[in-house]
Image (tube, rainbow, N blue to C red):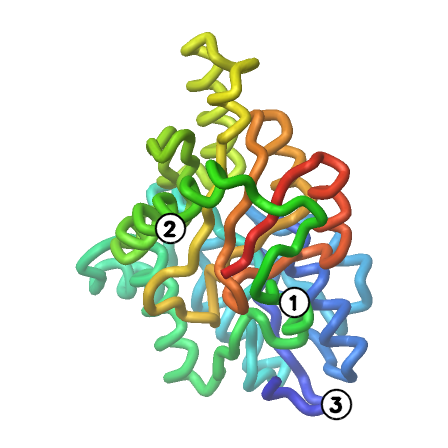
């Protein structure tokens, strides 16, 4: 952690519960949090978590973000919560500063875009720290985290899935694959993890094998990128992930140890145990 008690922390909030958890944890450790909530993504609940101030900004308003943090005296900031990949291609109009960033990009993937934004912030005196700051206890520890151990078939799926997912992750395509019988059923692209899992379930159902032993071996593998920048886009798993797996007929979840956040902590593992989902971190 790079923010001392009483100092101001800028929180750039995307979607999901991640920004809410980080805000609560930062405040509990004495930080004064100024939130820049992305209109197209952040939950209105962010205003109920005791921030010093909450400013609602459009995804395209990079200059306004910088001006807001500078006016508030923010020199350290953190990004938390996903900004959907498809937003890069949306109709949101960038301001001149973001337009300049977009024009400079060789590829419009998440890493290149947010990395370029992070450099602009740094140049303006706003240092971006790891999005796991204040939440390190929620990083997945190595080993079997669920009560049920993976079956041999699930372990084979995991080994194959990790090899596939790591190849994809190095191109910033997606970080999740869904495997059955050591065959790739679905690959994440712009739609996100939950949609990928549901699509895998639909593929299994459309093949008429939803109640077979084959579908019970459906395994979800989520990895970090080879050079994962922990300042943004860190892999996260929540109770909703487990619920989505249950809907799709998936029985095993494999994640990267120390590089994936269990957003609700033990609640995620309780949900997995209740659904008889094996969780393997390695």
Q: Quickly name the residue at label 2.
A: 162
Residue 125 percent coordinates (x, y): 46, 87
Q: Quickly name the residue at label 3.
A: 5
Image quadrant containing the N terminus: bottom right
**From mark 3 to mark 2, how far is it between C-alphas?**
40 Å
Circle 3 crowding by C-alpha within 10 Å: few under 14, some 14–19, many from 20 = some
Q: Which mark is residue 179?
A: none
Q: Residue furthest left?
A: 106
**From mark 2 to mark 1, how far is it between C-alphas?**
36 Å
Please give left or right for residue 6 compared with residue 99 in the image. right
Residue 48 visible: yes
Please give left or right for residue 182 compared with residue 75 in the image. left
Residue 135 percent coordinates (x, y): 66, 71
SS at badge 1 = strand
Q: Quickly name the residue at label 1.
A: 35
Q: Are marks 3 and 2 in contact (CB under 8 Å)?
A: no
């Amino acid at each position: 952690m790079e923010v001392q008690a009483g100092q101001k922390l800028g929180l750039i909030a995307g979607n999901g519960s991640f920004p809410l958890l980080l805000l609560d944890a930062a405040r509990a450790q004495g930080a004064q949090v100024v939130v820049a909530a992305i209109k197209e993504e952040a939950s209105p609940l962010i205003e109920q978590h005791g921030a010093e101030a909450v400013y609602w900004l459009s995804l395209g308003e990079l200059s306004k973000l910088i001006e807001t943090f500078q006016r508030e005296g923010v020199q350290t900031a953190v990004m938390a919560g996903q900004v959907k990949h498809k937003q890069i291609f949306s109709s949101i109009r960038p301001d001149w500063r973001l337009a300049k960033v977009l024009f400079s990009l060789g590829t419009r993937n998440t890493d290149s875009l947010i990395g370029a934004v992070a450099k602009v912030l740094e140049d303006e005196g706003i240092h971006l720290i790891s999005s796991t700051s204040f939440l390190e206890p929620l990083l997945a520890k190595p080993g079997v985290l669920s009560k049920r151990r993976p079956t041999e078939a699930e372990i084979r799926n995991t080994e194959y899935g990790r090899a596939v997912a790591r190849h994809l992750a190095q191109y910033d395509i997606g970080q999740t694959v869904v495997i059955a019988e050591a065959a790739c059923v679905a690959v994440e692209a712009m739609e996100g993890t939950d949609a990928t899992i549901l699509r895998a379930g639909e593929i299994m159902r459309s093949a008429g094998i939803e109640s077979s032993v084959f579908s019970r071996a459906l395994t979800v593998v989520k990895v970090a990128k080879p050079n994962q920048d922990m300042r943004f886009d860190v892999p996260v798993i929540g109770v909703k992930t487990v619920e989505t797996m249950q809907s799709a007929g998936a029985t095993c979840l494999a994640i990267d140890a120390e590089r994936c956040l269990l957003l609700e902590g033990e609640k995620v593992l309780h949900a997995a145990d209740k659904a008889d989902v094996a969780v393997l971190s390695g």
